[in-house]
Image (cartoon, coloured by chain):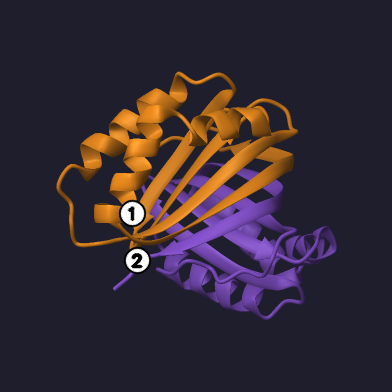
Chain colours: A purple, B orange
Amino acid sequence: MSKIANTPQPPYYAVIFTSIRTEEANGYDAMAEKMLALAADQPGFLGAESAREGVGITISYWADLEAIQQWKNHAEHLIAQKLGREKWYASFTTRIARVERDYSWVEKI
Amino acid sequence: MSKIANTPQPPYYAVIFTSIRTEEANGYDAMAEKMLALAADQPGFLGAESAREGVGITISYWADLEAIQQWKNHAEHLIAQKLGREKWYASFTTRIARVERDYSWVEKI
């Protein structure tokens, strides 16, 4: 997922999930991949960006708060969240933010 | 900077900077470190989180939009932004977002 998300004009919402992992890696990558694919199928999903380097940052973009709430309570996602707390994460912070402005720049070639 | 930022109660603001680098590495790490230290000294700075894994994500947190504007126009930061476009970044997107809710979780030991 090494790309900049191609989001529409603001306003839209960002869920910023910042995490520190445990040493338990078993099953994590497969679950992360599965959850990203599942999120991308949800109504209101606009894109996602992710990187881990010590700390992990995953940002998903959504059309509105209702879409975020529905994804938070999605049955398979609830299972993943539970496993995350039990196994994979030592700590995390989730922030819900309204994107008010954005601008992009691309190198001239 | 492998930590989760310890931000205050919302509302506050996030500047989400997502970037793809060029192959030019010369001077980048030193400038990134310098800019982070300088940002941390600005009025209204609340914290930052950063990771690069293919895509780079740096999020800085601020008390209000005025603080973000002042940092954007800081003389030394303007030089860094210019060098970034000339040398280090192939593309980037900056998003200004208002954090409305957050919650944290820490593993019980």
The three-letter code of the residue at mark 2 reads Glu
- The residue at the point 18 percent across, 52 percent down is B25
Residue under label 1, please give it.
B85
- The residue at the point 22 percent across, 35 percent down is B30
Residue under label 2, please give it.
A107
The three-letter code of the residue at mark 1 reads Arg
Which numbered tag is attached to residue A31?
none
Q: Mark 2: which secondary structure?
A: loop
In the picture, the quarter occupied by the N terminus of chain B is: top left
| Residue A28: percent from left, percent from top | 46, 64
| Residue A51: percent from left, percent from top | 42, 57
Which quadrant holds residue B2?
top left
Residue A85 can be seen, yes or no: no
Residue sitting farthest toward the right: A66
Which quadrant holds residue B8?
top right
| Residue B77: percent from left, percent from top | 39, 34
> Tags 1 and 2 in contact by the CB under 8 Å rule?
yes
Categorize mark 2 by other alpha carbons within 10 Å: few (<14), some (14-19), many (20+).
few
Q: Which chain carries label 2?
A: A
